[in-house]
Image (spheres, helix red, strand yellow):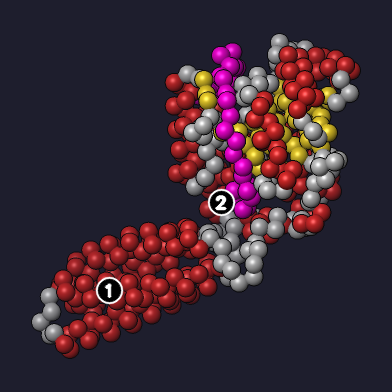
Amino acid sequence: MTSLLDTAADRFRPIDAAATGISLRTATVEVVIPVYNEEDDLERCVRRLHGYLSATVPYRWRITVADNASTDSTLDVAQRLTREFDNVAVRHLDLKGRGRALKTVWLESDADVVAYMDVDLSTDLAAFMPLIAPLFSGHSDVAIGSRLARSSRVVRGAKREFISRSYNRILRTSLHARFSDAQCGFKALRTDVARRILPLVEDTGWFFDTELLVLAERAGLRIHEVPVDWVDDPNSSVDIIDTAIKDLQGCWRVGRALATGALPMAELRASLGREPEVAGVPTGMVGQLVRFGAIGIICTLAYAVLYLALHAPLGAQGANVAALVITAVFNVAANRTFTFGVRGRDGMAKQNAQGLAVVGLGIALTSGSLWLLHQLLPTASNHLELAVLIVANLVVTVSRFVAFRWVFTHAPTR
């Protein structure tokens, strides 16, 4: 396993697509049960899971108990189960942390697919085959159980329901996450994908799931969601408030790393083969157009306010140029970061200069439109001037988008 993490070059060597196909005759899945002081529940969990896998899963499988620094007899129970069942193993870690346990076992795994579920088995095991099937077929890279899907059936208190929905709303707002349920303890991913993305996941606790999913999504991986039946464990020892605080701190850390370019997302996408599948066909065009349009509306409103405010002291042409330059600075920076996903300081000065040069075309067109208006209607009102300028800006918007796309898609995205 050390070879997987030795160098950045090894980490980001592109995956050979032909080598990732999984033969269903020899396919293997490793199900990890992370535990800390679960001496009372572990044996019941393993026996129930072992019976289910034996009866329903057509692939070769193994259950691994990941004991992260238990201080009770959890490890003894796990070791006794390994002596009873050939396909049950235990991995002991001296440090706590569910994320640490999962990352360690998954990176060591020789299975084709790795998965995990909580020891309380709150999620109905009937969802396990729908969870892993898309991974074995090659359709998806990551699979998660979702308690928030419309067809899911969930039994839990109002407090947990509110916190869960609020947290996932925060993820969608702050990190632009599209998956519905970050914290359901029922996930799986292809092992070749795990080996590429897990070295970038820093959290060792409960935020591990969220960080993994955010990075997977940003890397262009396909995340399959399975509606689940889920019954809350009333005896759960999880501290909801403490976990929520740590999750919010994790959101801030990951969001800042993505915004500053500290995470090598471009290299990760390339190593996973998530570049455009057909040469010359742009990807993400619809999303870029939506974000470009939203930024354009904001800038147009700001431009109108500035133009009317500056018209008296500067005149029509001066107000137009000043308003365009001021809004152009925000426009270029916002489109660089949000529309085209270019972050970090590499090449920032050059890209901003190119972006502002594109905006210069808009200044030439709008100034020319004003000149022509004044030739035809010397007594044109301020509002008519503004209307002509807005129309001129709309005309130049299409060419600006094309030019911005060329400038920023040739920049190193992260």
Instruction: Find the distance from the CA under tag 2 to the CA under tag 1.
Output: 36 Å
What residue type is disc 2 on? Leu
Residue drawn at x 45%, y 38% is 169
Along the line of sight, which residue is nearer the eye, 304 or 137?
A: 137
Residue drawn at x 66%, y 27% is 126
Residue drawn at x 52%, y 72% is 407
The residue singled out by tag 1 in the image is: 391
Q: Position of residue 331 (x, y in %)?
A: 39, 65
| Left or right, residue 7 beside residue 373 | right
Q: Is residue 406 above or below residue 184?
A: below
**Magenta span contains residue 356:** no
Checking the image for residue 372, the label placed there is none
- Dot 2 or dot 1: first in sequence order is 2
Q: Quadrant of the C terminus?
A: bottom right
Mark 2, other Cα within 10 Å: few <14 / some 14–19 / many ≥20: many
Question: Between tags 2 and 1, which lies in front?
Answer: 1
Numbered disc 2: secondary structure: helix
Along the line of sight, which residue is nearer the eye, 172 or 257?
A: 172
Q: Quadrant of the N terminus?
A: top right
Q: Position of residue 350 (x, y in %)?
A: 52, 72
Q: Quadrant of residue 36?
A: top right
Residue drawn at x 73%, y 45% is 137
Q: Which residues are magenta?
A: 216-242
Q: Position of residue 402 (x, y in %)?
A: 47, 73
Q: Is residue 22 above or below residue 121?
A: below
Q: Position of residue 115 (x, y in %)?
A: 72, 34
What residue type is disc 1 on? Val
Along the line of sight, which residue is nearer the eye, 318 or 243?
A: 243
The residue singled out by tag 2 in the image is: 258
Q: Is residue 354 above or below residue 182?
A: below
Q: Quadrant of residue 187?
A: top right
